Image: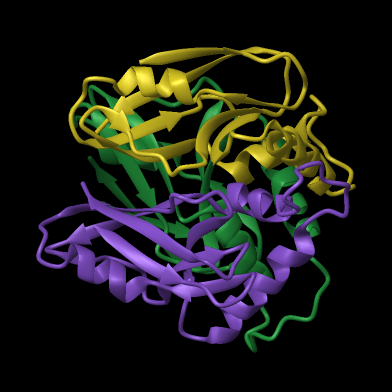
Chain colours: A green, B yellow, C purple
Amino acid sequence: MNIEVRSGARREMIDITRAVAAAVEGAGNGLCHVYVPHTTAAVVINEHADPDVARDLTAAYEAMVPQIRFAHAEGNSDAHLMATLLGSSVTVPVEAGRLRLGTWQGIFFVELDGPRSRKVWVSLL
Amino acid sequence: MNIEVRSGARREMIDITRAVAAAVEGAGNGLCHVYVPHTTAAVVINEHADPDVARDLTAAYEAMVPQIRFAHAEGNSDAHLMATLLGSSVTVPVEAGRLRLGTWQGIFFVELDGPRSRKVWVSLL
Amino acid sequence: MNIEVRSGARREMIDITRAVAAAVEGAGNGLCHVYVPHTTAAVVINEHADPDVARDLTAAYEAMVPQIRFAHAEGNSDAHLMATLLGSSVTVPVEAGRLRLGTWQGIFFVELDGPRSRKVWVSLL
């Protein structure tokens, strides 16, 4: 199942927990695979109760990019870099059709070179 | 299956290889999914022969946190940051009920904001 | 199925997309698991159209290693560090025996302490 995501800034964390939960609703037990088919975006699991956490993460990802001269002509090697460090997929246990996340956990699409229209692929194993 | 972990420091790598191996013992072939349901902890696979490696990793994770002003009031945004970079799950092949790790590989629970009582969820696909 | 990789430098990104695609060819639908059984190497998904991206990533991984004193006597703690941040496996959807990657995505073996002979384990779920 596809989730459509529309980012509004160059770097942004977008909470997609509800959309992923809807995609696995009614399925049995297994594992939910959430996959980002882009090379300048990622997906992570972290706290979604306090929006300050997502803001801190976005700022920290930017601050961690080393100040070296990049060769890639599109000028977005920082986004490719953080995408490889954060990862292109997460997997979450599913029980009786419900995502089994920890108490404070949510699933975030991480935009690293927006704003853009993006896709997330969700499948159940 | 749940593994209970008790960390004794703010940042600490705890070798959980034996507990994960015990959880999949006797199962057939497939993939073992090791999931951390916390937002200030992670799980990684790396060398567990020389304990200096885990100590170096813990020190390096601390040194990589950028010196920016974080907004999150709990003061543990550094832990949320490293949790997203290290990841909330690992997957390891299982053959005839045995974890198929590389020669030097072990599975570590990574505490980033301890000491705390933690859980790890292990499932087999 | 095993893929053999031969790296030619200390840090190098090696495109293994074709070899992984060949390993799942003819299989049905599911998820492809690509696993690196080493502790100073990793596997990531990112752009493989412009080779400058891989070069930028390799340079950035080196630049991100903090300048602290490492204890591990082999002197390759930087490689262990980046291996834990990049990760030991990736998972990619498979449809009708074909890897379902995004348009710009390829799968890279990331050598962090070469040159060496390495292995990658591919399985289908």
Residue at 38% from the left image edge and 59% from the top image edge: C120
- Residue most toward the front? C73
The picture places residue A28, in percent across and down from the top left corner, at 18, 27
User: Residue drawn at (52%, 86%), measured in percent from left and top?
Assistant: C50
Q: Looking at the picture, tell me which residue is in the foreground, C4 or B115.
A: C4
Question: Taking A73 as reference, is B52 left or right?
Answer: right
Q: Is residue C64 left or right of residue A54?
A: right
Look at 52% across and 20% down and name the residue there.
A103
Locate residue C106 relative to residue B46 in the image: left or right: left
Question: Looking at the rendering, which quadrant does residue B48 occupy?
Answer: top right
Q: Nearer the viewer, residue A53 or B10?
A: B10
| Residue C113 position within the rendered picture, expressed as x and y whole percent measured from the top left | 63, 62
Quarter in which the N terminus of chain C is drawn: bottom left
**B42 up-or-down from C75: above or below:** above
Q: Is residue B8 above or below residue C62?
A: above
Residue C96 in picture, x, y percent from top left = 11, 63
Q: Position of residue B88 (x, y in %)?
A: 52, 36
Depth check: C77 or A95 in front? Answer: C77
Residue shown at 51% from the left, 54% from the top: A87
Q: Is residue A84 visible?
A: yes
Residue A111 seen in render = no
Dividing the picture into quadrants, the one containing residue B20 is top left
